Image: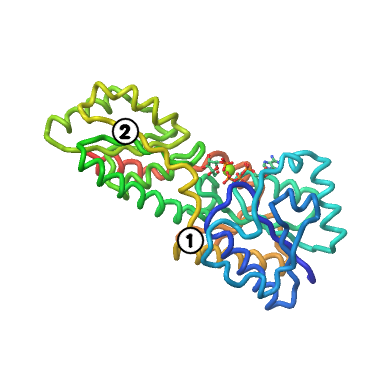
Amino acid sequence: MKRLAILTSGGDCSGMNAAIRAAARTAIANDVEMIGYRKGYAGLLKNDFIRLDSLAVSGVLQRGGTFLQSARCPEFRTEEGRRKALDNLLKEQVEGMIVIGGDGSLTGALALDKLGFPVIGIPGSIDNDIPYTDMSLGVDTALNNILYAVDCIKDTASSHDRAFIVEVMGRNSGYLASTAAIATGAEFAIIPETELDLTEMCHQLRRRYEEGRTNALIIMAEGAGHARDIAAGIKDAIGFETRVTVLGHYQRGGAPTVFDRLLGSRFGMKAVELLLSGTKGVMVGLAANALTTTLLEMVVNGGQKKLNADLLQMADILGI
Ligand SMILES: Nc1ncnc2c1ncn2[C@@H]1O[C@H](COP(=O)(O)OP(=O)(O)OP(=O)(O)O)[C@@H](O)[C@H]1O
Ligand SMILES: O=P(O)(O)OC[C@H]1O[C@](O)(CO)[C@@H](O)[C@@H]1O
Ligand SMILES: [Mg+2]
């Protein structure tokens, strides 16, 4: 192989730069040129790319987001759009492509694979909703962001005898909310995977209030509804004065943690090694700290990633 390409697609996340850098440098070490398409599939459709020599990827490891930029590209969802993408790849004599992104981006990668073009997927999404990998890029950094914010909020909660409902991202997944609840010592996690018994939650919070506890924390996944609606529903029942904080896009950015730098570097290197060895149509993943490969077909059609039942039980027990 002489020329490979890489792009980042969907919501940006920390660790994408580490993966691009590792992929570029692994290619260079094998005398292969790497190009990077700007703004995901949108750049591929416009043939907008840069050459990723060693200098082009220096100084990016410690930066959040993606220096290649990212986008959501409706045109790539069409057959015509994907044909155009394939034409551009062939015209530029690209022989293999690495797609870093979430479940949607990997669905796009599978569609490209089905057109006969060699593709490797790298899971990158703070939502951690991609099956066949314990962790996706950006999850660990996002969790650390959430922890910092919630620890700050806890100070105000305890200074003012308040309950706080903190809404976190995750789309349809409660991973960020349930994991952050354990790590911040929150009383409750409200997640889409489990039905909320509002009366029971209010009862328990009231009991805490009457026992003399001075504050309470509830972490709520965006996929489970709106924190403001829950706050309105509990305000007269629990005793505590209640406030809402929606963390929003603050969660997605920032310097990647050690975990995300390492994971991005491992994923990026492995993706190039796979392409050079003739493997295609797979996603790299992490299981029990070892790198894995899974057919994109299985990833895309694998259904919703399940939350670890032990973690959910732990969140329940420790929150009492
Ligand atoms: N079914 C599909 N077929 C082809 N391309 C798709 C498909 N679904 C998504 N894509 C492409 O992937 C892009 C990103 O998808 P999406 O917006 O779902 O984000 P994602 O990759 O899941 O990342 P995140 O959820 O972390 O933001 C879409 O804008 C589109 O270009
Ligand atoms: O950045 P946008 O397009 O507003 O998308 C926000 C969504 O993207 C994510 O940050 C990543 O999928 C979700 O958690 C969130 O719902
Ligand atoms: Mg997604």
Q: Where 28 falls versus 314 (above or below)?
A: below
Quarter occupied by the C terminus: top left
Sequence-earlier tag: 2 or 1? 2
Amino acid type assigned to the residue bearing label 2 in the image: Arg
Q: Determine the image quadrant of residue 31.
A: bottom right
User: Alpha carbon of mark 2 to alpha carbon of mark 1: how far?
Assistant: 29 Å
Ligand 1 occupies quarter: top right
Q: In what element is the residue under mark 1?
A: loop
Q: Do the residues under discs 2 and 1 have CB atoms within 8 angstroms? A: no
Task: Kindly identify which residue carries mark 1.
Answer: 255
Residue 168 on image: x %, y % = 43, 41
User: What's the residue at 69%, 72% (across, down)?
Assistant: 27
Place of residue 155 in the rendered image (x, y in percent of width and height, measured from the top left)? 25, 47
In the displayed orientation, state which residue is furthest to the left.
211
| Left or right of residue 76, residue 24 in this image | left
| Image coordinates for residue 134, horizontal then vertical, percent | 48, 53
Q: Nearer the viewer, residue 80 or 240?
A: 240
Q: Would residue 315 appear left or right of 271 to someone viewing this image?
A: left
Where disc 2 sits, the SS reads: strand
Front residue of 70 and 293: 70
Of residues 285 and 70, the one drawn nearer to the viewer in this rendering: 70
Q: Which residue is mark 2?
A: 243
Residue for point 45% across, 52% down: 142
As drawn, is 224 to the left or to the right of 32? Answer: left
Residue located 66% across and 44% down the image: 72
Ligand 2 contact, mark 1 (Cβ < 8 Å): no
Q: Is residue 192 left or right of residue 2?
A: left
**Quadrant placement of the N terminus:** bottom right
Residue 171 horizontal/vertical position (percent) = 51, 38
| Residue occupying the point 62% across, 47% down | 10
Q: Amino acid at mark 1?
A: Ala
